[in-house]
Image (spheres, rainbow, N blue to C red):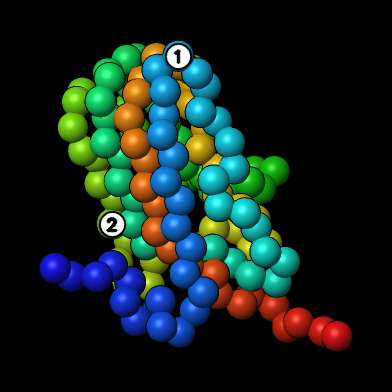
């Protein structure tokens, strides 16, 4: 079985998040914390929908004007939804975290995100 972002995991600090989305609660939250002087690169996202509903799940950074990485459609149906961004991944805004934003409660499932932190600015002592 292929290992996602194997090369970047050996060169940079890996990060991952697993979130259980409950139908009766709003799952909106920061799922990967920001690190000063680092940029998060997202390599893959999977959303396994177990209860369908007319709600969307948006994965975006925590910037004032967020960069949207992925978004499910309303009523996506049961089963997996996959987003692949290659070994290099897609970057968020520097110094920002990754958040899940739900349009409302009702949809249930499991979200998994993989990526890595890459230094984006010089660190001074």
Q: Secondary structure at mark 2?
A: strand
Q: Position of residue 63 (x, y in %)?
A: 66, 48
How far apart in space, not on screen, are marks 2 and 1 (Cα)? 29 Å
Q: Give the percent coordinates (x, y) of residue 90.
A: 43, 62
The percent coordinates of residue 6 (x first, y second) are: 31, 76
Q: Does the rendering let one see residue 40?
A: yes
Nearer-the-camera pick, 23 or 56: 23
Q: Label 1's element?
A: loop
Q: Residues within 10 Å of mark 2 (few under 14, many from 20)?
A: some
Residue in the picture at 38% in, 72% down: 88
Of 85 and 97, nearer the camera is 97
Which is more N-terminal, label 1 or label 2? Answer: 1
Residue corresponding to mark 1 = 24
Point out which mark residue 55 bears: none
Name the residue: 37% across, 62% down: 43
Judged from this view, the residue extending furthest toward the right is: 125
The x, y position of residue 1, in whole percent, is 13, 68
Query: In the image, which is nearer the foreground, mark 2 or mark 1?
Result: 1
User: As drawn, which residue projects farthest toward the left?
Assistant: 1
Q: Please give the residue where the numbered disc 2 appears in the rendered image.
A: 84
The quadrant in which residue 94 appears is bottom right
């Amino acid at each position: 079985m292929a290992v996602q972002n194997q090369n970047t995991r050996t060169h940079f600090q890996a990060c991952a998040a697993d979130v259980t989305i409950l139908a009766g609660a709003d799952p909106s939250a920061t799922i990967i914390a920001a690190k000063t002087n680092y940029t998060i690169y997202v390599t893959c996202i999977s959303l396994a929908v177990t209860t369908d509903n007319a709600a969307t799940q948006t994965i975006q950074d925590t910037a004032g004007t967020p960069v949207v990485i992925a978004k499910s459609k309303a009523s996506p149906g049961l089963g997996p939804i996959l987003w692949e961004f290659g070994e290099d991944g897609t970057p968020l805004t520097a110094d920002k975290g990754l958040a899940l934003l739900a349009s409302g409660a009702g949809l249930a499932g499991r979200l998994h995100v993989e990526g890595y932190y890459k230094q984006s600015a010089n660190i001074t002592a």
